Image (spheres, rainbow, N blue to C red):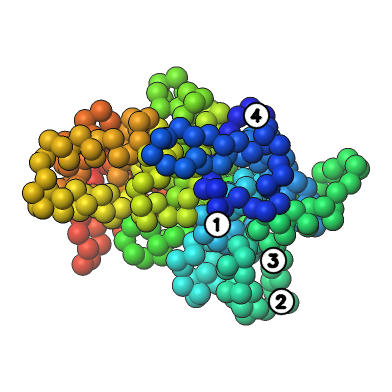
Amino acid sequence: YAERPCFGVKPDEVGLEDKSLSKEQLLVINESKLASPLVWYSYNHSFQRIKAIGKLLRELKIKPGSFIGTCGDNSKAYLECWLAILGHDYVSVPLSVTLSDDNTLHIIQEANICAAFIAPEKWERYEKLFGMLDTKEQDVLMLPMSERKISDWVKTFESKEEEKKLPMEPQVRTDEKDPRYEEPRIILYTSGSTGRPKGAVMSDGILQLECSRSIYKDYPHYHGTEVGICDSPAAVSSSIYNMLAYLVNGGRVSVYHNLSESFDICEQTGPSSLGMVPQKWNVLFKRYQARLNAGEKKEKLDKEFKNILGWRVQALNCGGATPIPAVQKWLKEVFTHCQITENYAATECGGITTSREGESGKIKKGVE
């Protein structure tokens, strides 16, 4: 795995301190004649960084089992911090940047977050939020998420001494005798699919099950050479599943801030599969319809759009909200070489699957 590409970014997102990395750590892979090549960080580079971040958390005397937040838009640094939290026995609480200040404060207090990695562009906002907490009750350690700053922090704690095992922080249980209790690994708190804030807890067992399922022989989309696109932060549950599925199989993941800005990156990256909410698929559908209404031939458009998502794509997924029937029908008609699916992940629960007063019925029969 050491020399395999792991995370890919656009050339202008490569940090200044990374320009001097060796060819084994920083790879340039040009697979598309239509676009400039992406820059890929090797598994060795990213996992050495993840290990260093974990060591930093230990040196700061943060006990395993503690709740640690991640605050920021999607980036390679964000994902490495998030993986370091999971890989060193902490509980991850990724905070969606779309949450209101009140809801963000609520989850920080309810989860008893003791530390948080903050992206540079979000530092001022979260510094103000954490300043509103009662330090006698809760004091949150703010850690920089940027490549350069966290590298400086890690160097401060470099040591040849053997890493000491710290005791696990006891988890709060509603019933000590409940045999169904599992240690939490991730707490998600997003707007969900109904527009109302909602939460979901992923246990350690569930997370391991998802990783195990992704390498099962009956899963044809993951066999070591696959490429994924991560355009949403870890606060979105489907991003968690998808990214881990690629990484545990030795695949690679290209990291973007927001896929809805342009589908051109798909030609650049060549993803093996692609999953998006209905609103994003609707962007592509409207582009197609506009050209069709302008008089272009349907056969020509079908052929062009069939290749617009890259040459590897085998599966397209629509989830996170009720699919738009016309768009779903169009996907099946144009992308005939792909498996078109619809699914709902951990945060698509509650109001989206049950009928309440004043709400419509279940959006999909059998969803629980």
**Quarter occupied by the N terminus:** top right
The crowd level at tag 3 (other Cα within 10 Å; few <14, some 14-19, many 20+) is some
The alpha-carbon separation of the residues under discs 2 and 4 comes to 45 Å
Q: Amino acid at mark 1?
A: Pro
Q: Is residue 349 visible?
A: no
Residue 3 is tagged as: 4
- Camera-side mark, 2 or 3: 3
Quadrant position of residue 138: bottom right
Residue at 47% across, 46% down: 230
Q: Is residue 111 above or below residue 42?
A: below
Which residue in the protein does label 3 denote? Answer: 142
Q: Secondary structure at mark 4?
A: loop
Q: CA distance from mark 1 to mark 3?
A: 14 Å
Q: Which amino acid type is shown beneath numbered disc 2?
A: Thr
Q: Which mark is residue 94?
A: 1
Give the mark toward the camera: 2 or 1.
1
291 with respect to 115 (left or right) = left
Q: Is residue 335 visible?
A: yes
- The Cα atoms of the two marked residues, 3 and 4, are separated by 33 Å
Q: Which residue is rendered at x = 47% and y = 55% of the image?
A: 257
